[in-house]
Amino acid sequence: MSYSLFRRKSIDNLMHEKKDAETHSHESLRRVLTVRDLTFFGIAAIIGAGSFSSLGAAVFTGGPGVILLFIICGIACGFTAMCYAEFASRIPISGSAYTYAYASFGELFAWVIGWALIMEYSIGNIYVAFSWSDYFTSLLDRIGWHIPEYFSTSYKEAQHAVEAGSDHQESILAWQNAPRIGGLRMIADLPAIAIVIFITFLVYRGVKESRNFSNVMVILKLAVIFLVIVVGAFYIDTANWTPVNNTGVKSFLPNGFGGMMLAVSGVFYAYIGFDAVSVLAEESKNPQRDLPRGMIFSLVLCTIIYILLSLVLTGVLDYRRFEGVGDPLAFIFEAKGVAWMQFLVSLVAVVAMTSVLLVFQMGQPRIWMSISRDGLLPPRFQQIHHKFKTPSFSTILTGLLVGIPLLFTDKTFVLDFTSIGTLFAFVLVCGGVLLIPRKEKVPGRFNMPFVNAKYVFPPVIIGALILLALLTPQYFTEMFNGDFSDYSAATDGKTHIFPTAATKIATIIFWAVNIMLAIMCFFRELSLIPVLGLVTCLYLLTGMSASNWMWFFIWFAIGLVVYFIYGYRNSHLQPKTVATPD
C-alpha cells in the first residue's frame, strides 16, 4: 500500500488519457484564449482584493518597509511562475498544480495539493466576496442608497466586534438592529452572496463570455490604478517613508525586519492568482507557448504595480493611519480631500474584485474536472455542459462552496487560511520540477533556462550562515534557546520582536531543508531556478502564525479522510482484481 500511495503518471500517459477522454466523450472545452487573454486573466486574478483591501493591513503591519516584502514575494512568485511555466509547457492540462504533482510526486501528494488548491480558489473567493461587498455598499452610500448594516455584514464579523468591544460602528449597528427569528439575529452579507451567484452564472455560461467580461474590467482597473499612482504622487511627503519608531529613531523599517515579516499573509495574498492561468490550458489556442507567457507577463506587471502603489500609500500618509482600513486606495484620497478620486477608486475596486471572483470561479471547477478524470472524485465532477462547454456540475458546486460559508465566517480567518494553502502548493510545484527529467529544447514552447545550482546554491547557503553567525549571533540563540513562548521585549531602549513558537519551528525546518538542498545540489546538479523557488516559498511560510498552521493541518486531515474513503479505492491507477474461476 505504501508504494501505491505514491504511484505516478508519466507525462505521456497524462496526455494520452486526456486525448482518450475527449475522443470517447466527444466533449471538450473550447480553445479560444490567446496570450493576451491569458495575461489579462492573470492580471484580473492578481489585482483585486490584495491591492484594494488587504494592502492597507499589510502597510500598517510592515510600515514603509513592506515594499521590501512585496519585492521578496514577487521574486518568490517569479521563480514559482517559471516552474509553473515549465510544467504547463509539458502538460497542457487543466489540473494546474494538481496534475503537475501527479507527474512528479505521485498520487497522494497530487490529492493533497488538489485539496490545498480549494483553499486558494474557493475559500480565497470568500474573502474577495466580502471585500467586494464592503466597496459596493460604500459606493452605494456615496450616491444615497443605503443597505442596512445587518444585510451588508457577516454574522461572525458583527459577533466578534461586539465580543471584543470594537469601535467598528457598522458591525455594532448590525448586531444591535438586526431582526430576530426565535432569538437568532438575521445577519448576512447579501451583496457578497449576490455577486457569487452572478459570477457562478456567468462562468457556467461559457469561457468566451467570461473572457470578454474580464478583459474589459482589466483595462478599466489598470487605467484607474495608473491614475491613482500619478495623482497620489503629487501628495507624497518623503518624510513618511522614514517614520519615527517607538524608540524615537527614523526608520524605513519602524517595526524591524521581523515586524515586516508579520505582514506576509496580506502581502502574499496580493499575489495569489497568477497560477490560476494554468487551469485554462484546455481553453488556450497554443497552451505550451501561451500559458507560460501569460503567467510571467501578468506577474511582472503586477509586481511593478504593487511596488508603486506601496510607495504612494506609505508616502502620502503615515503608515500607522492604515489601522483597520479596508479600502486603502480610496482612504488616502479621502484623507487629502480629493473626493472625485475617492469615488472613482471605490467604483473601480468593485470592478477589480469582480474580475478576481470570475477567474477563481473558473479555476476551481477545472481542477475538480482533472481530479475526477483520475478517478479520485466521482465522474460527475468532469461533466461538460453539452451547449456551453463548461464543467457544469463542478461550477455550480464551486458557487455553493463559496456562497454558503459567507453566512458563518469572516475575512480575517479566510485571508490567513488561503495564503498558507497557496504557499504549500507553490512549494510542491517548485519541488516537482526537480523530480521530472530534463527535456530537450523544443521550438515554439517555453524552455526554462538551466543553471547548475551546484556552483551557486551551496556557496550561498554557507555564506548566509556565516554572515548570520558573525553579524547577528542572536539569530541562532533565539531560534535554539528552547523557549517557544511568544513574546517581545525592550532592552537598551530598543524594542525587539522575538520569533514566535511557530516561527522558530518553521525557521529551523527552513534551514534544515536548505542544508539538505545544498548537499543535493552539489551531488545531483539540480536546476537553480526551481531550487530558488522552493527556498523562497519556504521562507515565506516561516512568517505564518500558529493558528495558520493549526487550521491548515485540520484541513489537510479532512482531505486525507476523503481520499482514503473514495479516491484511493477508485483511482484509475488502482490495480484491478481479476476474478478467478472456482
Image: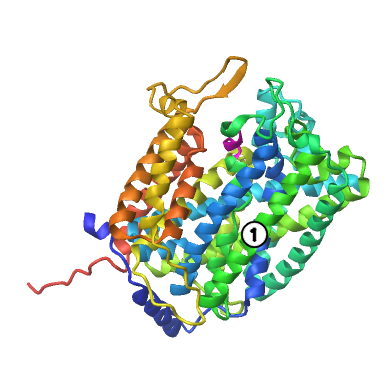
The quarter of the rendered structure image containing the N terminus is bottom left
The reply to whether residue 387 is in sight is yes
Residue 529 spot, x, y in % from top left: 46, 59
Residue 273 horizontal side relative to residue 224, left or right: left
Q: Confirm whether the magenta stretch covers residue 181.
A: no
Percent across and percent down for residue 28 are: 51, 80
376, 386: nearer the viewer: 376
Q: Is residue 144 visible?
A: no
Type of amino acid under label 1: Ala
Give the quarter of the image for residue 333.
Answer: top right
How is this picture coloured?
Answer: rainbow
* Residue 349 in the figure: left or right of residue 515: right
Which residue is the extreme one toward the left?
582
- Quadrant containing the C terminus is bottom left
Residue 394, percent from left and from top: 53, 64
Q: Is residue 532 above or below residue 322?
A: below
Judged from the image, the secondary structure of the residue bearing numbered disc 1 is helix
Q: Residue furthest top?
A: 492
Q: Main secondary structure of the magenta part?
A: helix
Looking at the rendering, which quadrant does residue 36 occupy? bottom right
Front residue (pair 231, 99): 231
Seen at 24% across and 60% down, the residue is: 4
Residue to which mark 1 is pinned: 45
The image shows residue 64 at horizontal and vertical percentages of 70, 38
Q: Nearer the viewer, residue 76 or 372?
A: 76
Query: Quick one: label 1, few (<14), some, or many (20+) residues within 10 Å?
Result: many
In the rendered view, would you say 264 is above or below 15?
Answer: above
Residue in front for this viewpoint, 551 or 255:
255
Q: Residue at x 34, y 76 (%)?
A: 13
Q: Residue at x 90, y 39 (%)?
A: 336
The picture quadrant where one finds residue 91 is bottom left
Range drawn in magenta:
259-263
